[in-house]
Structure formats: structure tokens, C-alpha cells
Image (tube, rainbow, N blue to C red):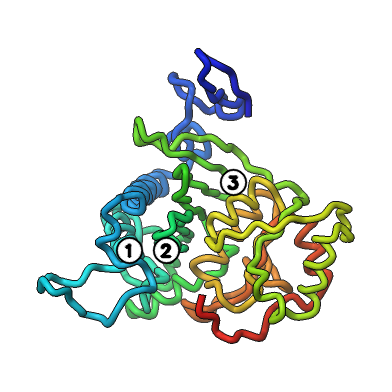
Amino acid sequence: MAFSSLSGVGVRLIPRAVASLSGENGVSTLMDYVGKGGIGAGDDLVVLLYHLQYACKRIAALVASPFNSSLIIGKQVGPAGATGGSGRDAPKPLDIVSNEIILSSLRNSGKVAVMASEEDDAPIWISDDGPFVVVTDPLDGSRNIDASIPTGTIFGIYNRLVELDHLPMEEKAQLNSLQSGTRLVAAGYALYSSATIFCASFGSGTHAFTLDHSTGDFILTHPNIKIPPRGQIYSVNDARYFDWPEGLRKYIDTVRQGKGKYPKKYSARYICSLVADLHRTLLYGGVAMNPRDHLRLVYEANPLSFLVEQAGGKGSDGKNRILSIQPVKLHQRLPLFLGSLEDMEELESYGDVQQKVNPGYEV
């Protein structure tokens, strides 16, 4: 990315790849890009994405608000139905509020048949004629909000399986939500950090858009992201080192000593926020991982693996391609390894990298 100086202030210049998609003002917005200016998505998908990005802006504002402390953060919720001394209804967890924002936006779009969320026990049937199915983790990393650590929203979009329309509502909602990742139409995440970034793929590359608070638009800032074939960073909670299998310990020991296939010492970078750790990995390369059965295939692993593959990387459970795994349960969990192609292949060559010992960590 090029920079110039204007009266002593750094000015970010728009790269040629963006300029070629730009309107008269020299920038391309997310809605420009998914319309005729970029991928030329169908009208239904454009409408859906408009409502999704609007939901993400609302969540970004909520997360950044100085008043979000009046809401309960994520997993710190007390007994259901508990009320404060004033007699008012108990505040809702921030991730539940985020879930409601997304559900409301999907309903308003008129383009979604069913939404399956990490926050709900079962998928929600929205409309008989909605052409799409949306799976989502509404607020990943919500326990980090009090410390102002980045959080995010993850989503995946499938076509509704019209061949299931004759089935009872609960059954067709479930089966539509359990589609293989190979059937994804689009996927993405919103990162809520020093900038709010909407990163998405529509099956033709991975692209990131940064929120311009002066206009309210997501602006294309990272067109056609290509993850480096090899990085020099691994991202994992290595406080769990002694619970790992031998293969994973050997891999980490090897690369951080610079004795792997890449003859430089690797560094550890771990935020403990999946969206943030993946975003850095997409830009700088390396591997982001959670080796235990912890991350959800439907809501996290499939959408993020889709993005990584579209950027030239690889998503795996340590043995198998994530997108080829057929979900059998909505909240199915598995190990997840995402990153640069050469790093991922080297990691998998160690064989035993899935953590089976899971003592149930408090933090």
C-alpha cells in the first residue's frame, strides 16, 4: 500500500486494483463491489449482504459503546430470569443482543429462509420463500470485550435446498443448516477492532472492506487477499502444551527453533479471539489453530475455511479438509487449523496434532 504526505499528514492512497473498481469518487464500497462494479452478485444476494453489513455496523457500535457495561458480557450471565434490585428486567448478554440484531436484519431482508446461530439451540425458520440459509456466530470472543480485545461476527450463506420444501418446518430448517461447507455461496466475518473490517468471499477470492465512519460505508481496502504461502507466525494457546499430542509438540518445537522446512524461527502471536487471529494470519501468513474439539464446524470452521481457501490457504481439522466434512449436528465441535498452504502441509505431516486430552479449562 502506498502512502504520500499532505501538510505533514499521512494520506493513504487507493491501490490500482481498487481504483479499477471505483466510482467517480475513487473508491469502491462493499455494495458497489457486490453489485455491477465487482462480482456482479444476483439481486437477492446483494439485498441480503446489505442487511448483513448493516447488522455488523450496529454490533460494532454496540461493542464500542461506553454504555455496553450495562449489558452482561457473554458467558458471565447469572441465572436465567434474574433481576436487579430496581425490579427491571435483567440485562441481556451482549452476544444475545448481537444475535437479535442479526435475526432482525435477516427478517427485514426478506431473502432468508432459515438462520442457524451458535446462540440458539435450533435453527429459526424465517420465510418459506427466502432463497438463502444463513449460519452465524453473532459475537465471537465476547468474553474479551471488557478488556477491549478485538471481537467479531462470523457468517456463512447457503442456497435454500428447495428439494426439502415438502418436509416439516423443523426438519427442513435443520437439514438446510447442516449443508457441507463445499456448498457455501458466500462467507465472511466482521472484525471489531481499531478499525471495523468486513472480510468476505463470494466464491471468487477473499476481499476486505474497512468501515469509513464519516460516510457509514464499508470501503474496499484489501482486494483479492492472497495469504502468503508460508508465514513466520503460529497462533495457539501454548499454555496447553503439555496436553498436546506428541506430533503437535514436535511441530511447535521445530518451527520456533527455526529447524523446520522454513529456516527461520517462528514467533507466537495469540489474541484468543478467533476472528482477530485469523485476520492477522490472512494478511501475514502462518497458522492459527485450536487443536482440541472446541470450535463449531457449522458456525466457525466452515465459513472461515471457505475464506482461507479462497485466499489460497488451507483449513483442516488436522487430518481432513474442513469443507469436506459433512456436519451431523448443529453444534458439532472439532479441532481447527487455518493458514498458509505450506505451513499447513508441514503441520499435517507430523500426523498426531489433534488434542484428545481436554481437562475442561476454566479460562
- Callout 1: 10 Å neighbours few (<14), some, many (20+)? many
On screen, residue 323 versus residue 191, left or right, reads right
User: Which mark sits nearer the N-terminus, 1 or 2?
Assistant: 1
User: What's the residue at 48%, 77% (across, down)?
Assistant: 331
Residue identified by numbered label 2: 142
Residue 136 shows in this picture: no
Measure how far apart labels 1 and 3 are at the Cα level. 28 Å
Q: Residue 190 in the image: state x and y as whole percent.
A: 46, 51
Q: Nearer the viewer, mark 1 or mark 3?
A: 1
Q: Nearer the viewer, residue 183 or 155?
A: 155
Q: What is the number of the mark on residue 206? A: 3
**Nearer to us in this view, 79 or 120:** 79
Q: Position of residue 170 (x, y in %)?
A: 34, 79
**Which residue is outermost to the left?**
87
Q: Amino acid at mark 2?
A: Ser
Label 1–label 2 contact, CB within 8 A = yes
Q: Residue at left 62%, top 40%?
A: 224
Against 167, residue 220 (above or below) is: above
Mark closest to the chain's N terminus, 1 or 3: 1
SS for callout 1: helix
Disc 3 versus disc 2: nearer the observer = 2
Amino acid type assigned to the residue bearing label 3 in the image = Thr
- Tell me residue 86's x, y (percent): 10, 71
* CB-based contact (under 8 Å), mark 1 and mark 3: no
Query: Is 313 placed left or right of 192 in the picture?
Result: right
Looking at the picture, which amino acid does disc 1 mark? Leu
Q: Is residue 234 above or below residue 205?
A: below
Alpha-carbon neighbours of circle 3 within 10 Å: few (<14), some, or many (≥20)? Answer: many
Identity of the residue drawn at 60% across and 79% down: 293
